[in-house]
């Protein structure tokens, strides 16, 4: 492909259908256009792809994009072809004939972009092939895979360091969404980008609304959440055990949802089938263990549910981060309760491994529990944990939207702690609550606990309120859980301070989720009003038809944001249709007529 005289803005508009570059995109493109290297750290959904796609189209030669996500290359290339971009990929999934065709197209200068797996790029034959071609740039996507300390390390990525020696004149750009500073340094060193310009965007995902709520009747809570907020959306529901995954998926189906299970106990075919349905269809819910997610690049995942507590904030952030890659509003919703806290604490203390390892695990769990129990902004706490300073409030988490009331729980906490002490530091929560409430149970009489000083001293609260007190005490480390005695609680250093009256403690008042749907802070979307639901569904139907006909995922035809724009602006002719975000020349030609027809029919229907 010879160098183009077009401006990046023109390509942005005519090919991608967007009006403006986002903050660092234009600057990054300029660097590459000038033949310089870059290291880009941008959160998921920030818009990394355009940074190398546009220079690949403008510079002479083909842009080589290295990606470890072989399963996604087909979709990425499909999406580009829909835009009229000449893209292909080379990986082990292609037949020898198909590979020959790609090489032929490369030699003929017919490609703007080529996606390759790292192991392919490392083959001598590929290197030789590339030496015989003009190369626009090398883009190394998911560049954190080069870091040996990260959890996605790929040995093949290490050899990418040879690119700088073999092709010193070709600009290189490495991209990742992994924020931590050590990983970034390692990427720069290993890929020869120490002197390159670094573009570091914040880690925040403003379109994700974080909500954590007390577990009461989790299935009913989930049902209410889905029906009220995500009736026909795609999402992921995470559970800890395979059995719970299977049960939950089956139950959601009986409730009218299109849910499929995903866990390591299913056959490879079943897993692939369920994953494919999730990617290709619009309203599929995957109920999964943590085995599901790596490399899921579906842009329109609208919600992530956790029915069980993740083990760390790292896991929580990564899992919730799979929502809303398209920048549209998405929800991260979790329920958690006393049993989660006790079980995880127990698991951790009983786990194998040396003391140092356990200490790290425990600290991570504490941070996770801390997030559940805080009464201030969740986003602030999350970002703070990852070392990113930010505003104290975000306006788009449950704590900001519905400030959490607290009460002075010092007296009650002391009663709870002393009840633990008086009963010998070996009983579980239910028994302790019975003692506090003065219950007349055989077990209490047998143990002679009806004569101790804490028997019946807690009648000012009911059982649920006491459960809340105990949960918060365990979560905040005022009580330890014994793994040998089935969840017996005992005191620790921290509890002694509280017991002795050295300090006080404020506890959350657990409230049910407010019944009104919380307001959303949106980046660029207007929510679909009830009156527009019909048009919205008709447009989705039209998109689905094209997706099925072309055997691609619906978002390859149009992203939700584009359909949303159509609902909002009601374009009635081609010129107006071009004004829709995500509509460029190629999509206008392929789909303009059909979608305009849907809108026209709807307008006619609604004016009679
Ligand atoms: P990342 O790779 O950083 O996760 P993508 O490159 O997939 O993000 O972009 C996320 C979404 O934002 C995509 O839907 C993309 O089309 C859209 N996008 C990117 N840049 C722009 C822009 N300048 N204007 C509007 N939408 C954009
Ligand atoms: Zn907030």
Image (spheres, rainbow, N blue to C red):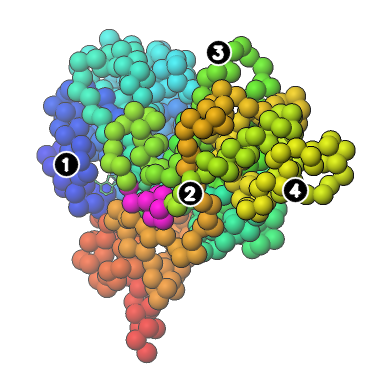
User: Going 20% across and 52% down the picture, which residue do you hit?
Assistant: 19
Looking at the rendered image, the quarter that the C terminus falls into is bottom left
Classify the position of the N terminus by image quarter. top left
Residue 201 coordinates in the image, percent (x, y): 26, 34
Judging by the rendered image, the residue that carries numbered circle 3 is 356
Per the image, label 4 sits on a secondary structure element best described as: loop
Q: Secondary structure at mark 2?
A: strand
| Lower sequence index among marks 4 and 2 | 2
Q: Is mark 2 within 8 Å of ligand 2?
A: no
- Compare marks 1 and 3 and give the one earlier in the sequence: 1
Q: Which mark is residue 407?
A: 2
Q: CA distance from mark 2 to mark 1?
A: 57 Å
Residue labelled 3 has its Cβ within 8 Å of some atom of ligand 2: no
What residue would you read off at disc 1?
A: 8
Q: Which residues are magenta?
A: 394-403
Q: From the viewer's perspective, is the residue at label 1 or at label 4 nearer?
A: 4
Sequence-first tag of 1 and 4 = 1
Q: Of residues 561 and 425, which is closer to you in this image?
A: 425
Rendered residue at 68%/30% (across/down): 421
Image mark for residue 438? 4
At horizontal 39% and vertical 37% (from top left) the residue drawn is: 381
Q: Is residue 474 visible?
A: yes
């Amino acid at each position: 492909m010879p160098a183009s005289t077009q401006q990046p803005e023109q390509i942005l508009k005519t090919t991608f259908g967007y009006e403006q570059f986002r903050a660092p995109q234009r600057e990054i493109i300029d660097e590459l256009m000038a033949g310089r290297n870059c290291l880009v750290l941008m959160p998921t959904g920030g818009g990394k792809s355009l940074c190398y796609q546009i220079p690949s189209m403008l510079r002479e030669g083909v842009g080589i994009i290295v990606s470890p996500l072989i399963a996604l290359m087909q979709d990425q290339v499909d999406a580009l072809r829909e835009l009229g971009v000449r893209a292909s990929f080379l990986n082990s999934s292609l037949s020898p004939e198909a590979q020959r065709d790609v090489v032929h197209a490369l030699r003929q200068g017919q490609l703007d972009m080529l996606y390759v797996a790292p192991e392919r790029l490392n083959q001598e034959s590929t290197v030789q092939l590339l030496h015989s071609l003009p190369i626009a740039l090398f883009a190394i996507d998911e560049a954190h895979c080069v870091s040996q300390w990260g959890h996605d390390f790929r040995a093949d990525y290490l050899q990418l360091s040879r690119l700088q020696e073999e092709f010193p004149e070709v600009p290189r750009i490495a991209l990742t969404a992994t924020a931590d500073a050590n990983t970034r340094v390692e990427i720069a060193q290993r890929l020869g980008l120490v002197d390159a310009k670094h573009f570091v965007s914040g880690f925040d995902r403003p379109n994700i609304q974080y909500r954590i709520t007390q577990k009461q009747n989790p299935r009913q809570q989930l049902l209410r959440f889905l029906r009220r907020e995500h009736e026909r959306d795609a999402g992921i529901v995470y559970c800890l055990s395979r059995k719970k995954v299977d049960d939950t998926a089956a139950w959601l189906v009986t409730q009218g949802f299109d849910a499929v299970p995903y866990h390591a106990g299913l056959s490879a075919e079943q897993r692939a089938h369920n994953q494919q349905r999730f990617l290709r269809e619009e309203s599929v819910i995957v109920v999964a263990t943590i085995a599901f997610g790596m490399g899921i690049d579906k842009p329109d995942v609208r919600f992530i549910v956790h029915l069980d507590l993740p083990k760390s904030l790292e896991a929580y952030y990564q899992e919730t981060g799979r929502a809303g890659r398209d920048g549209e509003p998405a929800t991260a919703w979790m329920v958690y309760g006393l049993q989660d806290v006790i079980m995880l604490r127990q698991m951790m203390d009983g786990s194998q491994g040396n003391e140092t390892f356990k200490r790290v695990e425990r600290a991570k769990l504490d941070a996770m529990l801390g997030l559940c129990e805080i009464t201030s902004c969740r986003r602030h706490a999350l970002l703070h944990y990852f070392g990113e300073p930010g505003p104290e409030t975000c306006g788009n988490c449950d704590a900001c939207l519905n400030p959490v009331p607290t009460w002075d729980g010092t007296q009650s906490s002391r009663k709870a702690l002393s009840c633990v002490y008086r009963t010998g530091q070996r009983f579980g929560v239910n028994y302790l609550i019975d003692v506090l409430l003065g219950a007349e149970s055989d077990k209490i009489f047998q143990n002679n606990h009806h004569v101790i000083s804490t028997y019946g001293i807690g009648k000012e609260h009911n059982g649920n309120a006491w459960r809340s007190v105990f949960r918060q005490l365990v979560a905040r480390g005022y009580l330890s859980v014994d793994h040998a005695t089935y969840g017996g609680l005992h005191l620790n250093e921290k509890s002694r301070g509280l017991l002795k009256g050295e300090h006080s403690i404020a506890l959350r008042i657990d409230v049910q989720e407010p019944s009104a749907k919380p307001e959303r802070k949106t980046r660029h979307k207007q929510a679909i009003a009830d009156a527009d639901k019909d048009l919205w569904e008709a447009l989705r139907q039209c998109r689905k038809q094209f997706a099925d006909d072309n055997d691609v995922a619906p978002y390859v035809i149009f992203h939700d944001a584009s359909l949303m724009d159509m609902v909002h602006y009601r374009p009635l002719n081609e010129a107006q249709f071009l004004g829709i975000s995500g509509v460029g020349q190629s999509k206008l030609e392929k789909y303009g007529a059909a979608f305009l027809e849907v809108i026209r029919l709807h307008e006619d229907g609604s004016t009679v």
